[in-house]
Amino acid sequence: MPPKITLKRRKRTDTSFEERQQLIHEIDSDDEEIQVIASKKTRHAACGDQIGDPPICPSKTASAREGSKKERGKSLRGEPDQATPSISSVSVVGTGIKGKMNLQKLEAMARATTKIKEEYTKAQSNEKDCLPWVDRNFPKDLEEHFVHKKKVNDLRVWLQNSLNADQCQSRICLLTGPTGSGKTATAYLLANELEMEIKEWINPMSLTQYEENRNFTDEIYGRSQTELFSDFLLRSSQYSALPVKGKKKLRNKIVVVEDIPNQFFRDTEAFHNILRNFQGCGTSPVIFIVGDNASGSNPMRLFTNGLLQELGIVQISFNSVAPTLMVKFMALVCSRENVTVQQPILEGVAAASGGDMRCAINTLQFKILQEKPVTKENGGFKRPLPRVTKVTRDKMLKSEELAHKDESLFLFRALGKVLYNKRNRSAVSTVEDQLHKDLLNQKREFSCEDDPEDIAHKVEVSTGTFIGFLSQNYVNFFTSIEEVSKAARYISDAEVLLSNWNYEDCSYGSNNFKGQDRKDQLALSIAIRGLMHSNTIPVSSRWRPLKKPLCSDVDIKNKQIVDRTRHLFPTLNSFLEGFYHEDIPFLAKITKGNVLNQDQRKLVNEVGIFKDLRNTYKPKWTETLDEKFAGDEDKCSEDDEISSTLTDSSAVYGAYNFVEIKSVDTKATVEDAFPEDFQIDEFED
Amino acid sequence: MDSDSMDTDIVEVNTAKQSMNKADVTGTDDESNVPWIEKYRPHTFEEICGNEETTARLAVFAQTGNMPNLILAGPPGVGKTTTILCLARILLGDNFREGVLELNASNDRGIDVVRNKIKLFAQKKVSLPAGKHKIIILDEADSMTEGAQQALRRTMELYSSTTRFALACNNSEKVIPPIQSRCAVVRFGKLSDAQILDKVMSVCALEGIEYVNEGLEAIVFTAQGDMRQALNNLQATFHGFGFVNSSNVFKVCDEPSPLMVQEMLEFCKDGKIEEAYQRLSYLWKMGYSPEDIVGNIFRVCKTCKFPEYLKLMFIKEIGMTHMKIADGLGTFIQLTGLIATLCSVNRGDE
């Protein structure tokens, strides 16, 4: 029945719209090839064009066009491809008979399609205008890519190894890292460079209801996402895309999964089984791209340590982009978009986005965009006024920047206002006389320069973060210990207010926001007023560095551990108070037998064994706060070279993970054996 | 108190007649039944109050098109949805109806909606001029489930050539990081009292409302920087009483009268517990919930002209009581306890 068949086709290719787009592209790619042959030179395809296109259909490939051109040289001569895939440029143009025939045919087609091409390029340039900056300015090649070279190389090594059948290492790679750190971009660029075809899994639309135990033979009816995903993974690696005219097949494929089906968060075992299956019979490598944020349905949860080790999955963790690289890339983007931006603004945007490239470019686009320059279509009617626009643009930028600063107090300035506690020496406040005579020591003759409520109102970060910053930094700004103790009391009051409310379910119900809001206001008001009041002799307004709160790191870690524990010990009641300081330390002592699996063992060792805190605990005093810091709660971007983790370096270069497993085991047993008791004693001292 | 209410009663009768007449006159007009919040919803960027910087930015995008995906974050009633609708209206012009998909929390927004409805809309072909895009407005995005947000993130990228997303939310931290990363975050601040007053007065002029200044002050106080609430309260007061003065406003909004709370706090400052208790028990007998009472005490206290130390201690005590009440101890004795503590602060006994 026709309607059902169309339905199925939809599922496969996702959309008819994409199909159309794809066809257009195929016409285009034909065309480009002809040009290449005609001019007898290889031209580097502008892959910026393709990347913007939605890489949806399994058969549509991001690297198809560029790769096909290069490969054509080889395959036309009919030679079996023995060349290693790392050879990146093959500039030989086919000269065999078959090649000539193809050439003539193609030339004939070229004439026919010139018109189409013209129309298409026009449409395409329009389409390119339509893309947001993030997509339009996708890095063209690895040269200008903003990810650290070492990480790129890690992935390249893995990809190259995965193509070699002899080195039967894992076919699964896991890219982790914060959002906007260039995970996807790196994967696509590398695939391009290594001439690989990318197939990406996109969660399909479920237009029909899936029923689990339905007894039917017609497979067109709803199938579960799990089933579809498993099919995709196994089949995409076995079968190549349909040979569409004009598109040369790429020999190698990689499968990219970024959009993990929701079902697996409920049923991780199903996911693991699919991966095990795949490890057994899959042929092409798979890259999973997951972000690591500490939220509930964190995809990282699917990849337990046990699974990573069992299947030998290679994990490459990206770091957030270093500020210098960000500024460099943003400058490139600006030059491409024909806007002039001062360096400080770029630096500001980079700092504010906290190492998130995509976010930075979005912000940049939002902040910088000016009146549209006169386009060619309108050019005849409107006279372009280059000089005038240039000046006004600069002016505009400046005023904007200033306006922005006034509008929303940057975290830094808000902190400074509270901590330096500037008093208005000229305005003696009259209301202070209302204080009782016994409370004269509490009298503050001069009123604050800024109203505390005003500061509270303009703080952009969450209340908890702001109070965290205050409590991290206030001590340096006080001159007497008595006042510090008072201030500490107020901060503790504020934190009590902040933490203990169960507004979630009671009293305010759906109007939760207001309750939350009021609670925040109360806490903030107390913290700010308390600090400003108790500090009678503030330090001179000499510059003092501000630090990020240590406790936020601890909080994040705490959250992660709780999350992991609940996941790994579903049977135990981890909500009980004693669980973490009684049950887990005792579990850590049980070394023999198969009480715990590998993941659990690792967690228990991590949480339950007290290390010598005097040696391991090093406060990061170096993390000073930058003026433009906008309150990103993630950890700040580290220098890439320093923070290459054990997992990725050993895994990638060693190709086997046994080394790592062994080292983990020995570490665990050594710690179990004796130093632990000793250390606990010390800890109790 | 009594004479006061008498006065207002008389005024009420008079103005009620007037408003009756007016209703007769305008009864044929369709617009008379429209909530003012809709009737006076701004349609151009110039009309939007507050957050001038942000709206100016967005106005540029309305002209040039090609905006990035946006997250509009801010408290309720500051014009997030209005702004984005303005943008869409100007950007899409006649295609507004077919080019915009608006989903808010009342729509079902599970994973399947993101997967099907949003994707179908994103794939829909709408012929638009170059640089213009279909816009999907997801109101109250922070109430979307995390799974739905996860499903959204790749969709946003795949259709970026044809569709842009605008997410409005109160708390941008509840939007998952991958989505935040794909959007430019635009923050909206609370509207200042002056901005609200301005708008309220202009509406009063347009509707021909009689008011006294205290009435408008009361409207602004109850609104707490929320324009929607201000206009709703104004309309309710006007339709209920036909005249805007403070007692009418507080009858409509049914909040503990801030004037009375202020008196109470003044007495607390002077340590006069009997007088303060009278005010409190009056409020209690009026039937206000303890949350409302303590919440209003806090808001009044913030604006009072007290010595710094007193204000700090007052706020601290109020906060503690607020916490107890929120935990379920909403009894009268907690409130009287608060009064007693406040009275003892300025006595210097400690």
Image (cartoon, coloured by chain):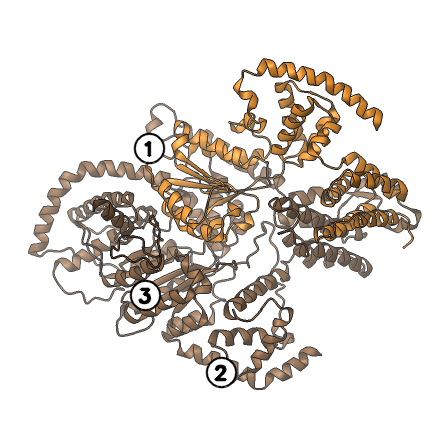
Is A406 displayed left or right of A217 in the figure? right
Q: Chain of mark 3?
A: A
Q: Nearer the viewer, mark 1 or mark 3?
A: 1
Same chain check for tags 1 and 2: no
Q: Is residue B262 left or right of residue A154?
A: right
Marks 1 and 2 sit apart, C-alpha to C-alpha, by 65 Å
Q: Chain of mark 1?
A: B
On screen, residue A256 above or below A584: above
Which residue is under mark 1? B127
Q: For the residues carrying marks 3 and 2, which lies nearer the camera in this image? A: 2
**Which image quarter is the C terminus of chain A in?**
bottom right
Q: Tag on residue A423?
A: none
Question: Is residue A154 or residue B148 the one in the foreground?
Answer: B148
Q: CA distance from mark 3 to mark 2?
A: 30 Å
Q: Residue furthest left?
A: A97
Is label 1 in a helix, a strand or a loop?
Answer: loop
Disc 2: which residue: A666
Are the residues flagged by discs 3 and 2 from a single subunit? yes
- Residue A95 found in image quarter: bottom left
* Residue at the image point whose x is 80% and y is 25% from the top: B5
Residue topped by disc 3: A159
Q: Between tags 1 and 2, which lies in front?
A: 1
Hue of chain B? orange
Residue B64, given in percent of the width and then of the height, sits at 42, 33
Q: Amino acid at mark 2?
A: Thr
